[in-house]
Amino acid sequence: MTIQAFVILAVLVEAFTGLIKTLLQNFGVTLTDWMDQLISLVLAVGVAVGGRVDFFAILSQVLPVNLNFPPVVGIVLSAVVLARGSNAVHDLLKKLNPPAEGALRMW
């Protein structure tokens, strides 16, 4: 896996987080900030565990530092990075694409 693939996974986590939030809000569920982060974390854990994503193994390929985390620790920490990275992607997309007056925001 490459760093670019990891960034794409963060974008996908953010896209699905936005979709789930929109669906829940359409059913009348009021979401707080911590609920957004929880949804993102749950999705990121699913992606990291399902795809055995280890961000720190990827970094070891790019940087001259070998972190040598056990695979389980690397996957769990990768899920946290994916979840927080997806929030950063969300903030970037929100600034780059503000919604028009009265338009539905996709993310």
Image (cartoon, rainbow, N blue to C red):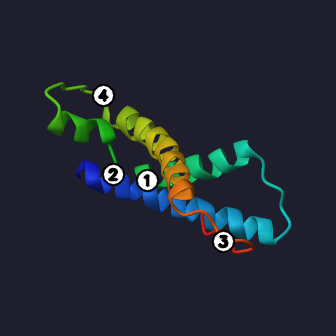
Residue highlighted by disc 4: 69
Distance of label 4 from label 2 (alpha carbons)? 18 Å
Residue that lies at the very extreme toward the bottom in this rendered image: 103
Residue highlighted by disc 1: 10
Task: Specify few, some or many for label 3: CA neighbours under 10 Å numbering under 14, 14-19, or 20 or more.
Answer: few
Distance of label 2 from label 3 (alpha carbons)? 31 Å
The disc label shown at residue 6, or none: 2
The disc label shown at residue 2, or none: none
Q: Is residue 55 visible?
A: yes
Residue 85, how many percent across, how many down? Answer: 46, 45
- Give SS at disc 3: loop
- In this orientation, which residue lies closer to the viewer: 93 or 45? 93
Q: Residue at x 65, y 65 (%)?
A: 20
- The amino acid type of the residue labelled 3 equals Ala
Residue highlighted by disc 3: 100
Residue 15, how many percent across, how many down? Answer: 53, 64
Distance of label 1 from label 4 (alpha carbons)? 21 Å
Which label's residue is closer to the chain start, 2 or 3?
2
- The amino acid type of the residue labelled 4 equals Phe
- Give SS at disc 1: helix
Left or right, residue 103 beside residue 63: right
Q: Is residue 51 visible?
A: no
- Between disc 1 and disc 3, the foreground one is 3
- Between disc 4 and disc 2, the foreground one is 2
Q: Residue at x 25, y 25 (%)?
A: 67
Quadrant location, the C terminus: bottom right
Distance of label 4 from label 3 (alpha carbons)? 46 Å
- In this orientation, which residue lies closer to the viewer: 107 or 76? 107
Q: Residue at x 83, y 61 (%)?
A: 29
Distance of label 1 from label 3 (alpha carbons)? 25 Å
